[in-house]
Image (tube, helix red, strand yellow):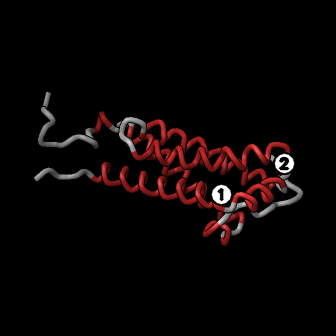
Protein backbone atom coordinates (compact mmCIF):
# COMPACT_ATOMS: atom_id res chain seq x y z
CA UNK A 1 0.00 0.00 0.00
CA UNK A 2 1.36 3.40 -0.99
CA UNK A 3 1.88 5.88 1.80
CA UNK A 4 0.32 9.30 1.17
CA UNK A 5 2.69 12.08 2.15
CA UNK A 6 1.83 14.73 4.70
CA UNK A 7 2.55 17.38 2.05
CA UNK A 8 0.12 15.91 -0.46
CA UNK A 9 -2.58 15.76 2.19
CA UNK A 10 -1.78 19.35 3.20
CA UNK A 11 -2.09 20.45 -0.43
CA UNK A 12 -5.45 18.70 -0.80
CA UNK A 13 -6.76 20.36 2.38
CA UNK A 14 -5.59 23.77 1.15
CA UNK A 15 -7.22 23.16 -2.23
CA UNK A 16 -10.49 22.09 -0.59
CA UNK A 17 -10.54 25.16 1.67
CA UNK A 18 -9.88 27.49 -1.26
CA UNK A 19 -12.50 25.83 -3.48
CA UNK A 20 -15.08 26.11 -0.71
CA UNK A 21 -14.14 29.76 -0.12
CA UNK A 22 -14.37 30.77 -3.79
CA UNK A 23 -17.58 28.91 -4.50
CA UNK A 24 -19.20 30.20 -1.33
CA UNK A 25 -18.19 33.84 -1.80
CA UNK A 26 -18.83 33.86 -5.55
CA UNK A 27 -22.27 32.26 -5.35
CA UNK A 28 -23.28 34.38 -2.35
CA UNK A 29 -22.45 37.53 -4.31
CA UNK A 30 -24.32 36.23 -7.37
CA UNK A 31 -27.42 35.22 -5.41
CA UNK A 32 -27.44 38.53 -3.52
CA UNK A 33 -26.39 40.64 -6.51
CA UNK A 34 -28.50 43.71 -5.66
CA UNK A 35 -27.12 43.93 -2.13
CA UNK A 36 -23.58 43.17 -3.34
CA UNK A 37 -23.82 45.96 -5.93
CA UNK A 38 -25.28 48.37 -3.37
CA UNK A 39 -22.60 47.66 -0.75
CA UNK A 40 -19.77 47.87 -3.29
CA UNK A 41 -21.19 51.19 -4.47
CA UNK A 42 -20.77 52.51 -0.95
CA UNK A 43 -17.05 51.71 -0.87
CA UNK A 44 -14.98 54.85 -1.37
CA UNK A 45 -12.24 52.94 -3.19
CA UNK A 46 -14.30 51.09 -5.80
CA UNK A 47 -17.41 53.27 -6.07
CA UNK A 48 -16.73 54.33 -9.70
CA UNK A 49 -16.38 50.71 -10.86
CA UNK A 50 -18.73 49.02 -8.38
CA UNK A 51 -21.12 47.78 -11.09
CA UNK A 52 -18.30 46.15 -13.04
CA UNK A 53 -16.78 44.62 -9.89
CA UNK A 54 -20.16 43.32 -8.68
CA UNK A 55 -20.55 41.38 -11.94
CA UNK A 56 -17.00 40.24 -12.69
CA UNK A 57 -15.68 39.45 -9.21
CA UNK A 58 -18.17 36.66 -8.36
CA UNK A 59 -17.69 35.11 -11.80
CA UNK A 60 -13.92 35.24 -11.36
CA UNK A 61 -14.16 33.69 -7.87
CA UNK A 62 -16.19 30.75 -9.20
CA UNK A 63 -13.79 30.42 -12.14
CA UNK A 64 -10.81 30.26 -9.77
CA UNK A 65 -12.57 27.49 -7.84
CA UNK A 66 -12.91 25.61 -11.13
CA UNK A 67 -9.22 26.08 -11.90
CA UNK A 68 -8.33 24.57 -8.53
CA UNK A 69 -10.35 21.42 -9.18
CA UNK A 70 -8.43 20.22 -12.23
CA UNK A 71 -4.78 19.16 -11.95
CA UNK A 72 -3.93 20.73 -15.28
CA UNK A 73 -5.05 24.20 -14.12
CA UNK A 74 -4.43 23.85 -10.40
CA UNK A 75 -1.23 25.90 -10.28
CA UNK A 76 -2.89 28.76 -12.16
CA UNK A 77 -5.78 28.56 -9.69
CA UNK A 78 -3.39 28.69 -6.75
CA UNK A 79 -1.60 31.73 -8.18
CA UNK A 80 -4.98 33.38 -8.84
CA UNK A 81 -6.06 32.55 -5.27
CA UNK A 82 -2.88 34.05 -3.88
CA UNK A 83 -3.28 37.18 -6.01
CA UNK A 84 -6.95 37.62 -5.08
CA UNK A 85 -6.30 37.06 -1.41
CA UNK A 86 -3.43 39.60 -1.49
CA UNK A 87 -5.74 42.05 -3.24
CA UNK A 88 -8.60 41.50 -0.77
CA UNK A 89 -6.24 41.69 2.21
CA UNK A 90 -4.75 44.95 0.91
CA UNK A 91 -8.25 46.31 0.30
CA UNK A 92 -9.36 45.51 3.85
CA UNK A 93 -6.17 47.00 5.28
CA UNK A 94 -6.72 50.18 3.23
CA UNK A 95 -10.36 50.35 4.30
CA UNK A 96 -9.41 50.03 7.95
CA UNK A 97 -6.60 52.58 7.83
CA UNK A 98 -7.46 55.09 5.10
CA UNK A 99 -11.20 55.08 4.51
CA UNK A 100 -13.61 57.61 5.96
CA UNK A 101 -16.39 55.00 5.71
CA UNK A 102 -16.26 51.22 6.07
CA UNK A 103 -19.27 49.55 4.41
CA UNK A 104 -20.29 45.96 5.05
CA UNK A 105 -20.03 44.29 1.65
CA UNK A 106 -19.43 40.69 2.65
CA UNK A 107 -22.28 38.26 2.66
CA UNK A 108 -23.17 35.07 4.43
CA UNK A 109 -21.01 33.78 7.24
CA UNK A 110 -18.22 36.28 6.55
CA UNK A 111 -20.60 39.15 7.33
CA UNK A 112 -20.51 38.25 11.03
CA UNK A 113 -16.78 38.97 11.19
CA UNK A 114 -15.54 42.40 12.20
CA UNK A 115 -13.23 44.10 9.69
CA UNK A 116 -10.21 43.25 11.88
CA UNK A 117 -11.30 39.60 12.09
CA UNK A 118 -11.84 39.61 8.33
CA UNK A 119 -8.31 40.95 7.86
CA UNK A 120 -6.91 38.08 9.95
CA UNK A 121 -9.08 35.57 8.04
CA UNK A 122 -7.74 36.94 4.74
CA UNK A 123 -4.13 36.81 5.93
CA UNK A 124 -4.60 33.15 6.88
CA UNK A 125 -6.14 32.32 3.49
CA UNK A 126 -3.39 34.27 1.71
CA UNK A 127 -0.86 32.07 3.50
CA UNK A 128 -2.87 28.95 2.57
CA UNK A 129 -2.71 29.99 -1.09
CA UNK A 130 1.03 30.73 -0.84
CA UNK A 131 1.72 27.35 0.79
CA UNK A 132 -0.43 25.74 -1.88
CA UNK A 133 1.71 27.32 -4.61
CA UNK A 134 4.86 26.14 -2.86
CA UNK A 135 3.57 22.60 -2.44
CA UNK A 136 2.17 22.42 -5.97
CA UNK A 137 5.35 23.70 -7.60
CA UNK A 138 7.34 21.25 -5.51
CA UNK A 139 9.80 23.84 -4.25
CA UNK A 140 10.72 21.39 -1.52
CA UNK A 141 12.01 18.91 -4.09
CA UNK A 142 15.64 19.15 -2.91
CA UNK A 143 14.41 17.65 0.35
CA UNK A 144 12.27 15.04 -1.46
CA UNK A 145 9.24 15.97 0.60
CA UNK A 146 6.80 15.23 -2.18
CA UNK A 147 8.37 12.03 -3.43
CA UNK A 148 7.87 8.51 -2.27
CA UNK A 149 10.98 7.43 -0.29
CA UNK A 150 10.73 3.90 -1.76
CA UNK A 151 11.23 5.22 -5.28
CA UNK A 152 14.09 7.66 -4.64
CA UNK A 153 17.55 6.39 -5.36
CA UNK A 154 20.68 7.27 -3.49
CA UNK A 155 23.48 8.92 -5.43
* Residue located farthest toward the bottom when viewing the structure as drawn: 112
Query: Compared to 102, does 113 lie above or below?
Result: below
Q: Secondary structure at mark 2?
A: helix
Nearest to the observer: residue 52 or residue 79: 52
**Point 80% across, 61% down: residue:** 103
Task: Tell me which label, 2 or 1, sits earlier in the chain.
Answer: 1
Q: Are marks 2 and 1 in contact (CB under 8 Å)?
A: no
Q: Residue at x 53, y 44 (%)?
A: 63
- In the rendered image of this protein, does residue 55 appear above or below residue 141? below
Q: Position of residue 2 (x, y in %)?
A: 14, 50
Residue nearer the viewer, 71 or 84: 71
Q: Is residue 6 left or right of residue 13?
A: left
User: As drawn, which residue projects farthest toward the right?
Assistant: 100
Q: Position of residue 94 (x, y in %)?
A: 77, 50
Q: Which residue is mark 1?
A: 29
CA separation in Å, label 2 and label 1: 17 Å
Element class at badge 1:
helix
Along the horizontal axis of the image, is 129 left or right of 69? right
**Image point (59%, 41%), residue name:** 83
Amino acid sequence: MRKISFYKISLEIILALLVILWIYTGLTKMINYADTRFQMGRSPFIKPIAGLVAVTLPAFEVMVAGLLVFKRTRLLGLYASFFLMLLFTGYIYAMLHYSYYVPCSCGGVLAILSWNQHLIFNIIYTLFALFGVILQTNLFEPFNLMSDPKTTTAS
